[in-house]
Image (spheres, rainbow, N blue to C red):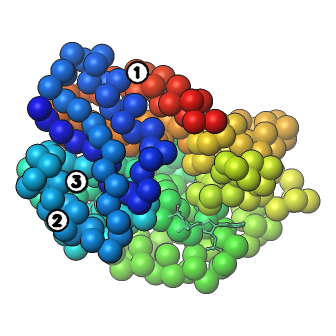
């Protein structure tokens, strides 16, 4: 049996087992299984060794709060080092990568959102924002970061400059200033609007959303967030974060199995698993 899974603390609400196991079933990969593996943050190194040596795991996905903590225990690739977080580990060679970036950029492409040369506003300065800024900058966008705590955004950019050589095309602004720069895409990388606080939005009341805006909300629970409703009410277009979640999983699927992932199957399974949790 080829065993993979997801580590985190807690991991009970992850929809990844549903997505991956549906993909194995669809492709007839009956000797693959994807399991939940709760690992407390204070014993992450030991947890990884146990899963590899005693559990027989081939690899694992990594979710909160362990994405940074696993870094010293694997060989992170350039992308994971730049972002400072690993979400996929392959025990066969000890490597760690970050497929969140791939998931995000692939999902933008799947929705025909063009990034090269675009002015993109990123809301947030945590781990999710870091992945977004890295992916967008590498894809040739001009990125404007807006964050409640402006200093945290400055630190994020300084980090990305040092770790990924991203020195130009990325700046920190207030929301007012950023709107003045006429972005064509706004990406919410904050947790604001996430279930159960579904009535909240990271967009400050009173500032109109730019006309014709595309809003990408990394939040996937609920599937339609308050911010997405605001974008649509302003005549814009809204894309939720489920596609990104599915596509980061699809990239991990391919890494482990060497097979192309059945993205639509994973999307349906992910959506059903989410619905079952509400
Ligand atoms: P993640 O790793 O998932 O990105 P994180 O590191 O906790 O999570 O980052 C959460 C982001 O959401 C931060 O940018 C945070 O803003 P601060 O840097 O000011 O803390 C943002 N955020 C969380 N709650 C918020 C709120 N109520 N209003 C505005 N921003 C919020």
Q: Residue at x 57, y 30 (%)?
A: 276
The answer to which quarter of the image holds residue 143 is bottom right
Instruction: Using a 10 Å C-alpha cutoff, classify the residue at mark 3 as few (fewer than 14 neighbours), some (14 to 19) or many (20 or more).
Output: many
Does mark 2 have its CB less than 8 Å from ligand 1? no
**Are the residues at dot 1 and dot 3 in contact (C-beta closer than 8 Å)?**
no
Location of residue 25 in the rendering, given as x and y in whole percent from the top left corner: 28, 19
Regarding mark 2 in the picture, which secondary structure is present there? strand
Q: Residue at x 20, y 61 (%)?
A: 48
Going from N to C along the chain, the mark reached first, 2 or 3, is: 2
The answer to which quarter of the image holds residue 112 is top right
Distance from the alpha carbon under mark 2 to that under mark 3: 9 Å
Q: Which image quarter holds the N terminus?
A: top left
Location of residue 146 in the rendering, given as x and y in whole percent from the top left corner: 66, 68
Regarding mark 1 in the picture, which secondary structure is present there? helix
Location of residue 193 in the rendering, given as x and y in whole percent from the top left corner: 71, 52
Q: Which image quarter holds the C terminus?
A: top right
Regarding mark 3 in the picture, which secondary structure is present there? strand
- Give the side of residue 230 with respect to residue 166, left or right: right
Can residue 32 be seen at all in this image of the molecule?
yes
Distance from the alpha carbon under mark 1 to that under mark 3: 23 Å
Instruction: Using a 10 Å C-alpha cutoff, classify the residue at mark 1 as few (fewer than 14 neighbours), some (14 to 19) or many (20 or more).
Output: some
In the image, 188 versus 42, the foreground residue is: 42
Distance from the alpha carbon under mark 2 to that under mark 1: 31 Å
Q: Which residue is mark 2?
A: 75
Does mark 3 have its CB less than 8 Å from ligand 1? no
Q: Which residue is mark 3?
A: 89
Going from N to C along the chain, the mark reached first, 2 or 1, is: 2
Determine whether 73 is above or below 2 in the image. below
- Give the side of residue 31 with respect to residue 25, left or right: left
Q: Which residue is mark 1?
A: 265
């Amino acid at each position: 049996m080829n065993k993979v899974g997801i580590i985190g603390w807690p991991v009970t609400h992850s929809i990844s087992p549903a997505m991956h196991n549906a993909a194995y079933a669809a492709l007839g990969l009956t000797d693959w299984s994807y399991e939940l593996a709760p690992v407390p943050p204070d014993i992450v190194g030991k947890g990884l060794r146990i899963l590899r040596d005693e559990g027989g795991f081939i690899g694992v996905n990594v979710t909160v709060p362990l994405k940074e903590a696993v870094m010293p225990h694997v060989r992170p690739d350039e992308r994971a080092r730049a972002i400072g977080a690993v979400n996929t580990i392959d025990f066969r060679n000890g490597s760690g990568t970050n497929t969140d970036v791939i998931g995000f950029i692939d999902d933008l492409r799947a929705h025909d959102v063009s990034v090269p040369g675009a002015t993109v506003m990123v809301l947030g300065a945590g781990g999710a924002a870091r992945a977004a800024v890295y992916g967008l900058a590498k894809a040739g966008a001009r990125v404007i970061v807006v964050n409640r705590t402006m200093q945290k955004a400055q630190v994020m950019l300084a980090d990305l400059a040092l770790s990924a050589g991203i020195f130009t095309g990325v700046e920190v602004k207030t929301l007012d200033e950023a709107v003045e720069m006429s972005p064509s895409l706004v990406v919410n990388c904050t947790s604001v609007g996430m279930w159960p606080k579904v009535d909240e939005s990271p967009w400050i009341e009173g500032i109109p959303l730019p006309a014709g805006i595309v809003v990408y909300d990394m939040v996937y629970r609920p599937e339609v967030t308050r911010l997405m409703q605001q974008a649509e009410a302003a005549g814009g277009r809204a894309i939720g974060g489920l596609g990104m979640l599915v596509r980061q999983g699809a990239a991990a699927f391919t890494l482990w199995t060497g097979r192309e992932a059945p993205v639509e199957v994973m999307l349906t399974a992910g959506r059903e698993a989410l619905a079952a949790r509400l």
